[in-house]
């Protein structure tokens, strides 16, 4: 069961990226001025990029897929980052966490009940398979 337990351990990097990203976006949206060159817009876009990268790291498992999804989602989040979309980017990360939890529950059920798929298939009519 060590492999099964390893799959259920949430990765630390996506959680830290999302925390930093969401905090940066919220700070940029609530402060009138910052000490950063470029103002709050730079901080907003950096937070959006970090949150987009966290989404990509959370929903994928293979290295090549992770690299592509991190790049696409980080650039996409930077592109759309604004006052109106910061909450949506945050909700995107929440959806990624829900997806991770659902897939972890599915792996747990599949490991705990290996014959479940055959039992359910036997109950269904042939047309539903």
Image (spheres, rainbow, N blue to C red):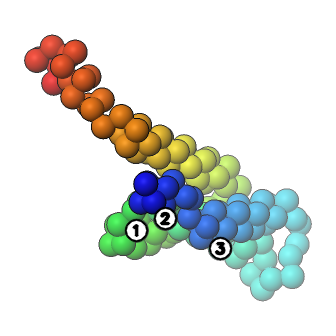
Image quarter of residue 68: bottom left
- Classify the position of the C terminus by image quarter: top left
User: Disc 2 vs disc 1: Cβ atoms closer than 8 Å?
Assistant: yes
Q: Position of residue 43 (x, y in %)?
A: 72, 73
- Spatial separation of the CA atoms under disc 3 and disc 1: 19 Å
Mark 2: few/some/many CA within 10 Å (<14, 14-19, 20+): many
Q: Position of residue 19 (x, y in %)?
A: 70, 63
Nearest the eye: 80 or 25: 25
Which sits earlier in the primary sequence, circle 2 or circle 3?
3
Q: Which mark is residue 46?
A: 3
Nearest the eye: 13 or 75: 13
- Spatial separation of the CA atoms under disc 2 and disc 1: 6 Å
Residue in the image at 87% along x and 65% along y: 31
Residue in the image at 85% along x and 59% along y: 30
Please indicate, yes or no, whether residue 106 appears anywhere in the rendered image.
no
Mark 1: few/some/many CA within 10 Å (<14, 14-19, 20+): some
- Classify the position of the N terminus by image quarter: bottom left
Which sits earlier in the primary sequence, circle 2 or circle 1?
2
User: Disc 3 vs disc 1: Cβ atoms closer than 8 Å?
Assistant: no
Secondary structure type for disc 3: helix
Secondary structure type for disc 2: helix
- Spatial separation of the CA atoms under disc 2 and disc 3: 17 Å
Mark 3: few/some/many CA within 10 Å (<14, 14-19, 20+): many
Residue in the image at 26% along x and 22% along y: 120
Q: Which mark is residue 57?
A: 2
Secondary structure type for disc 1: helix
Q: Position of residue 107 (x, y in %)?
A: 40, 45
Q: Position of residue 2 (x, y in %)?
A: 45, 60
Which sits earlier in the primary sequence, circle 3 or circle 1?
3
Identify the residue under disc 1: 66
């Amino acid at each position: 069961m060590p492999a099964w337990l390893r799959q259920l351990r949430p990765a630390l990097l996506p959680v830290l990226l999302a925390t930093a990203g969401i905090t940066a976006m919220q700070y940029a949206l609530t402060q009138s001025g910052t000490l950063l060159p470029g103002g709050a817009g730079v901080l907003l876009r950096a937070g959006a990029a970090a949150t987009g990268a966290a989404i990509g790291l959370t929903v994928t498992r293979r290295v090549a897929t992770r690299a592509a999804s991190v790049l696409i989602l980080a650039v996409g989040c930077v592109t759309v980052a604004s006052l109106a979309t910061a909450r949506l980017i945050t909700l995107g990360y929440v959806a990624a966490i829900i997806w991770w939890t659902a897939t972890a529950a599915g792996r747990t059920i599949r490991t705990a009940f290996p014959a479940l798929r055959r039992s359910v298939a036997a109950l269904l009519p042939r047309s539903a398979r």
